[in-house]
Amino acid sequence: MTIKIKIGSTLIPFQLILMYIFNTVILQYTINPVILQIGNFVPALLVFFITLYLFKDTLVSDWKKLSLSKWKLLLIAILGVIAIQLIFNVVNILFPVYENDLDRIAIPFSGLSFSEKVLFLIFSVGTVASGLTEEVYFRYLFIKKIFIKHQYFGLICSSFLFGVAHYFLEYTFVSTISYMVIGLFFGLIYLKTDNIWYTISIHMLNNLCFSILITFIS
């Protein structure tokens, strides 16, 4: 295993630790969702740029190997986002995170001004950037590098860890099941296409849509 792969294998744990530290400190002073987003924004962008630096050759190579137009890639990304939401909703019906909506932690977006929502959306760039980081980490590294001789085992491991990495969204392990299934979905696409940009485009577009919806519809 090369030094680059060893460093790359620490990126998501490093990002999660930084997010935990940032958010723990910020929560001592405010619960404003705009300010709290900084705790995700800074670590996410930092790890994003490290990922670009470490794996730029792979990203450029796969981009050049795309055998379809960028508009078709966008269409695939849109269909992928729809598929993800269907998977998410079906799994949550089978494994409900909350018994009722009163148990859900409410985020007071409705009380924010328009300028605060715009600022929140800007900070959400970190969430969108994480789409690329997570695909390189969970798909490329696990399936193509770490478990190169046992790719389907890597698929299972990466899907499980992808779900666990999203524990902090709801702070319950039941909520990670849907992300494990989505991770499996991403992994199968990567194995089928052998090109990381398919899953990156779906993942980043999904995160972008989620950021817009949670900001302006809440």
Image (cartoon, helix red, strand yellow):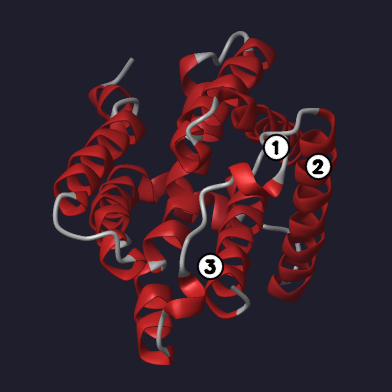
Q: Quadrant of the N terminus?
A: top left
Relative vertical location of residue 26 with respect to residue 75 in this rendering, above or below:
above
**Residues at discs 2 and 3 in contact (Cβ within 8 Å):** no
Q: Image check: 201 left or right of 44?
A: right
- Cα–Cα span, label 2 and label 3: 19 Å
The residue mark sitting in front, 3 or 1, is 3
- Cα–Cα span, label 3 and label 1: 18 Å
What residue sits 60% from the left and 64% below the top?
210
**Residues at discs 2 and 1 in contact (Cβ within 8 Å):** yes
Q: Residues within 10 Å of mark 1 (few under 14, many from 20)?
A: many
Q: Depth check: 22 or 48 in front?
A: 22
What residue sits 49% from the left and 42% below the top?
169
Counting residues from the start of the chain, the first of labels 2 and 1 encountered is 2
In the drawing, what numbered circle is on residue 87? 2
Q: Quadrant of residue 97?
A: top right
Q: Which residue is mark 3?
A: 211
In the drawing, what numbered circle is on residue 28? none
Q: Secondary structure at mark 1?
A: helix
What residue sits 20% from the left and 42% below the top?
24
Asked if one can make out residue 144 in the rendered structure from this viewpoint, the answer is no
- Cα–Cα span, label 2 and label 1: 7 Å
**Residues at discs 3 and 1 in contact (Cβ within 8 Å):** no
Q: Which residue is mark 1?
A: 182
Q: Depth check: 136 or 38 in front?
A: 38
Counting residues from the start of the chain, the first of labels 3 and 1 encountered is 1
Question: Residue 138 appears at what percent x and percent y?
Answer: 51, 31
The amino acid type of the residue labelled 2 equals Ile
What residue sits 46% from the left and 55% below the top?
60
Question: Residue 215 appears at what percent x and percent y?
Answer: 52, 74
Asked if one can make out residue 150 in the rendered structure from this viewpoint, the answer is yes
Q: Residues within 10 Å of mark 2 (few under 14, many from 20)?
A: some
The amino acid type of the residue labelled 1 equals Ile
